[in-house]
Image: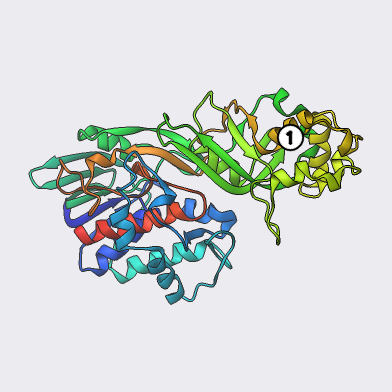
Amino acid sequence: MSTEWDAVVLGGGAAGLFCAGVAGQLGKKVLVLDHAPVLGEKIRISGGGRCNFTNLHSGPANFLSLNPHFVKSALAKYPSSEFIKLVASYGIAYHEKHQGQLFCDDSAKQIIELLMSECTKGNVTIRNPVLVESIAQEGSKWIVRTDTGVEKTKSLVMATGGLPVPAIGATAYSLDIAKQFGLKVVEPKPALVPLSFTADTFGSLNELAGLSVPVRIASGSKGQRYGTCRFNEDVLLTHKGLSGPAVLQASSYWTEGEPIHIDWLGAIERPNGFNCDELFNDEDNRLKSAETILAAVLPQRLAKAFAEQNNVTGRKWAEVSKKDRQALKELITNWSVKPAGTLGWKKAEVMLGGVDTKELDGQTMMSRQNPGLFFIGECVDVTGHLGGHNFQWAWASGFVCAQAL
């Protein structure tokens, strides 16, 4: 027994549900299939349970891809302002937390409920948990065999996400289907993930665990997959090394064996401006201790640690040679540390890599060589920066796909 659909969407997460809802409201007969007993779990746990559902400033510069221009069309057709209007139409209260990041005031479950309501408006059929056993193409139709029956469809939308958080059912299924039908896949890697460090790297900073400091962080190199990055974000010192938004951002650009660089003064905001050279050369400071001078621009515990590391503890500034001052400045403004690795898929928020964008039409998200086969959301080689950009890609890629079904 089989049913014929305009579109079958595999994956009931952010991209899949949004795409299905839009397509259904355009008059398409849509079926969503998912293997999970509960839909939207990744949405539910995102943003500390409040879902950073988009970013006011989301644009092409906020995404990594081997083809950085690929995202332009989808983001232009469905910018963050459109999803914000949708959220507001449901009466969901939200707030801007940091650098354009928008969070629900109440709960991430409100975004899941919004998506389910949009599907209801479009008369979308949702079935879960369902196990997909095979996918085949017969002429212009796609045949999806599941443990509950066979579905025929004009269009098949792959929206099963990526590999992060395997505990809630994440798989590489979309990538497997891409390979099955001859599409190239950019090797996936964990992204927006804490970095691990060897025990001896942070021996002198162990007592600073729990301290959060705004910094400028740099990672990557011109010869690597996605080039270099610089972010002004907070770094969190922990017993195991470094974490926090700054490190998560840097992780997407970091390559094994490479160091990351931190300017501990780079993100300082001062009403009258801040000049690093003046700090280290100001002779008005000559009778002050090195720790006092550093504590004027850094947390006291961190200032003390840097003074100890450079052997200037207890010394008046006038007693510190120009050479030692320069060494201290270099230590603080270009602090270099080499991570041992990442904490892997269990701790990653998103996936780098995925279906090669060269294989897809950026206007529709359809495979160039397989008419009727679409890939949206995280399974595509498009990865956003921290701060709601990955959800915005789910909405935008899902929207343009829905228009093309």
| 123 versus 226 height, above or below | below
Residue bearing mark 1? 239
Residue at (53% x, 36% y) in the render: 219
In x, y percent, where is residue 99? 55, 59
Residue furthest left as drawn: 139
The 10 Å Cα crowd at callout 1, few under 14, some 14 to 19, many 20 or more, is some
Q: Is residue 365 left or right of residue 337?
A: left
Q: How many marks?
A: 1
Residue at (79% x, 47% y) in the render: 299
SS for dot 1: loop
Q: Quadrant of the C terminus?
A: bottom left
In x, y percent, where is residue 377? 36, 49
Q: Is residue 347 visible?
A: no
Which colour assignment does the render follow? rainbow
Task: Give amino acid for label 1.
Answer: His
Q: Nearer the viewer, residue 367 or 11?
A: 367
Quadrant of res 182: top left
